Image: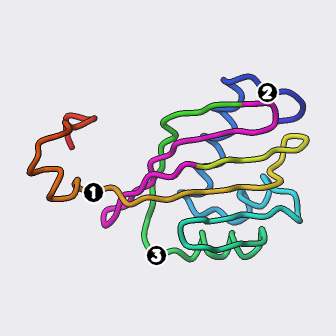
Amino acid sequence: MRGGMDVDGAMDFLRAYWACVAAQDAEGLASYFWPDAEIFWHCTNERFTVQSFIQANCTYPGRWRGEVERVARDGELLVAAVRVWSDEASFHVCAFLRLEAGRIRRIDEYWGDDGEPPAWRRALRLGSPIRPEA
């Protein structure tokens, strides 16, 4: 995507990007980045080059699926909430992607494990499921 991008264009860009992430498509992923882009996984205090990010993503065990749930755009900054899951695990990630001329210059990601609320909150019956199947 070159130049300005509306919210629909941002959603298309992010769906295609996350499809490459979930498919562990190294060649496809590389096409989204500037060669000197940086990727930050803040929850585990890791900083990656494009090549090390692609290696980490594409060698992660399991078969993965992903779904972009929400997108916001502010100029060249895209913000996405994405569910990523396999048969063994499920996560949500909040990703901030800084674009430059339609390619990724920087990503800041915050990953969280999906799961049950902690026992103390369940005991107090404070919340209710967001999704009926949960």
Amino acid type at circle 3 is Pro
Q: In which quarter of the image is residue 62?
A: bottom left
Amino acid type at circle 2 is Met
Q: How far apart are marks 1 and 2 (CA)?
A: 34 Å
Q: In which quarter of the image is the C terminus?
A: top left
Answer whether labels 2 and 3 touch (C-beta < 8 Å).
Answer: no
Q: Check the image and tell me how it is coloured.
A: rainbow
Badge 2: few (under 14), some or many (20 or more) residues near its Cα, within 10 Å? Answer: some
Mark 2: secondary structure = loop
Q: Nearer the viewer, residue 125 or 59?
A: 125
- At x 66% / y 76%, what residue is drawn? 55
Of circles 2 and 3, the one toward us is 2
Mark 1: secondary structure = loop
Q: In which quarter of the image is residue 127?
A: top left
Q: Distance between the residues labelled 1 and 3?
A: 20 Å
Q: Residue furthest left?
A: 123
Mark carried by residue 5: 2
Q: In this view, does 70 lie above or below 125?
A: above
Of circles 1 and 3, the one toward us is 1
The residue to which callout 3 is attached is 61
Measuring from the top left, give residue 118's x and y in whole percent.
21, 58
Badge 1: few (under 14), some or many (20 or more) residues near its Cα, within 10 Å? Answer: few
Extent of the magenta region: 74-94
Amino acid type at circle 1 is Gly
